[in-house]
Amino acid sequence: MKRTHLPLNGLRVLDAAARHLSFTRAADELAVTPAAVGQQIRALEDTLGTVLFRRTTRGLELTPEAEAGLEALRHGFLCFEDAVRAMQAGQSSKVLTIAAPRDLTARWLSARLVELAAQDPELRFHLVPADEAIDFTEANLDVAIRLMVDKGEHEGARIGSSSFCKVASPTGDAERWIAWPGHAAPEPVLRVADAGLAIEAAIAGLGRALVPELLARREIESGALRLLGETVDQGLSYWVFAPTPQWRQAKVRRLVEHLGG
């Protein structure tokens, strides 16, 4: 059933004017002019088809029609306030639902979440895989992270850089390529599902891989992998992104800041 259009501004003015029985005092409460209050009341009377106030020698008086609706009107405003408080309660939630690639989660993100949780022990994380299609309207997601060219239609921030590096085991095969969806290497010795698996295969000595420097940094620093030449810009970066309502949440802003986005 189609809902009746509610003239909410006029109803708010009616509530204030009825409490004060004065357009001037209602205007002070609402931070508008008395003329604006009078204009809103006249417009509301036109919409409702009834007179709401009468001026008498004793001052402003409510008509019986206005009095008949005041109790329900004020109860309605209390319900609106309850609804707003309920919707704002999500801002205080300590649970962050994050969609992220499995390899990024294992090799980089989890350690950053541990650091963030150490700053606020009440934080809780729900991690889900970042599938091909991320639908914020159907999934209960706060934020997503993907390897992309840019943030797309949503609000977003880049994590790290777009630098990719060629890596191989210090003692293994450094001639043949390991391919994954982010780098379609020519005639690869092995094809894997993501950059994390390509890194593992390179560590095992199966060949060389071109992977995001962000994911391979730990193994390069530990000596498990060696760099082959300079880093290259592949035009792909990890982006953290979300629709505007989620992006404005304090917990999401804190996460993005911590991840260096």
Image (spheres, rainbow, N blue to C red):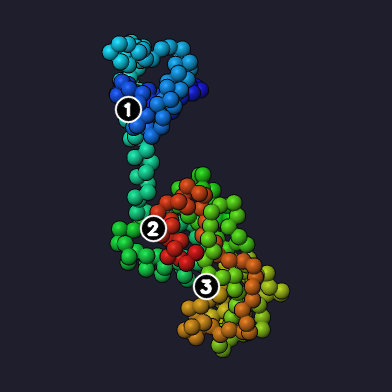
Residue 170 percent location from the top left of the image: 55, 88
Residue 27: percent from left, percent from top: 37, 29
The residues tagged by marks 3 and 2 sit, at their Cα atoms, a distance apart of 21 Å
- Answer left or right for 122 relative to 183: left
Q: Residues within 10 Å of mark 3 (few under 14, many from 20)?
A: many
Regarding residue 54, the answer to whether it shows in the image is: yes
3 or 2: tag closer to the N-terminus: 2
Asked if residue 178 shows in the view, the reply is: no
Give, as a three-letter code, the residue at label 1: Arg
Identify the residue at horizontal 47%, vertical 71% (top origin).
107
Up the image or down, 136 lies above or below 122; here it is above
Which numbered tag is attached to residue 125? 2
Looking at the rendered structure, the kind of residue marked 3 is: Leu
Q: Residue furthest right?
A: 186
Image-quadrant location for residue 62: top left
Q: Amino acid at mark 2?
A: Phe
Percent position (x, y) of residue 202?
A: 57, 79
The residue sitting at 58% across, 57% down in the picture is: 151
Tag 3 residue:
215
Furthest residue toward left: 58
Tell me the SS state at disc 2.
Answer: strand
Tell me, yes or no, whether the two marked residues, 2 and 1, touch with CB atoms within 8 Å. Answer: no
> Gap between marks 2 and 1, in whole Å?
50 Å
Viewer-closest of 45 and 106: 45
Residue named by callout 1: 25
Residue at position x 47%, y 70% from top?
Answer: 108
State the separation of the CA atoms marked 1 and 3: 64 Å
